[in-house]
Image: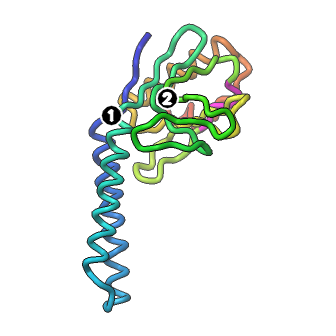
Amino acid sequence: MKEYKRSVGWSILSSFLSLVTVGIMLGIFMYFFPGSEISMMLGIVAVVFVLLIISFFSDMKQKVMLDEGKIIFKDFKIKNVRSFAFGSLKTENTKQDMKVFDIPCSKIEKMEAGRDIIFWRYNLHLTVEDMPTCIVIPCTMSEHKELYSALITHVEKTKPSVYVDRKLTKYLYK
């Protein structure tokens, strides 16, 4: 069972670019509203910096493992669930612990590509039967193309009728 982890370099670059973007936005705000207080602006940058550091360390724990007939996710965030910075994910309906969960390959309906806004590479979106939103495997995982192709072959072995996006296969095999 191979384990795929989050890439440190891509995660640092993503956090840095997010902080620079917030700084630029605050600079534009200060340019158009020159009477605003600088201490308030620096406070906002400090809060955003602390939130990015917390997000960076929580995201660095993310792992994906392929096991026989299932995919194991560790420390993944799923949309539409409540999460706390260093806590586990809990669904709103069941209050079930979702810090480590696995998904059987037979329950995966779609594997689609979605552009990452910062790096303009593709993220993998897995649509699962019982989940209201998809699971996003980011392009900032180390060896992300190898992970995506391993996931496709792993799922297609179990469920040959799974939908695989053409953009994703073009991205992987060009």
The magenta stretch is: 108-112
Is 163 left, or right, of 37 in this rendering? right
Residue reaching furthest bottom? 35
At x 64% / y 40%, what residue is drawn? 92
- Residue 30 in percent (x, y) is at 32, 83
Is 129 left, or right, of 31 in this rendering? right
Residue annotated with mark 1: 7
At x 49% / y 31%, what residue is drawn? 172
> From the image, which quarter does the N terminus lie in?
top left
- Residue 145 in percent (x, y) is at 44, 29
Colour style of the rendered protein structure: rainbow
Viewer-proximal residue, 130 or 98?
98
Is 13 left, or right, of 117 in this rendering? left
Magenta stretch, main secondary structure, is strand
Residue annotated with mark 2: 99
How dense is the environment of label 1, judged by Cα within 10 Å: few (below 14), some, or many (20 and up)? some
Q: Secondary structure at mark 1?
A: loop
Q: Viewer-nearest of labels 2 and 1?
A: 2
- Residue 17 in percent (x, y) is at 32, 56
The amino acid type found where label 1 is placed reads Ser
Number of marks? 2
Instruction: Judge whether residue 141 is colored magenta.
Output: no
At x 41% / y 31%, what residue is drawn? 62
Q: Secondary structure at mark 2?
A: loop
* Label ID, residue 165: none
The amino acid type found where label 2 is placed reads Lys
At x 34% / y 74%, what residue is drawn? 26
Mark with earlier residue (2, 1): 1
How dense is the environment of label 2, judged by Cα within 10 Å: few (below 14), some, or many (20 and up)? some
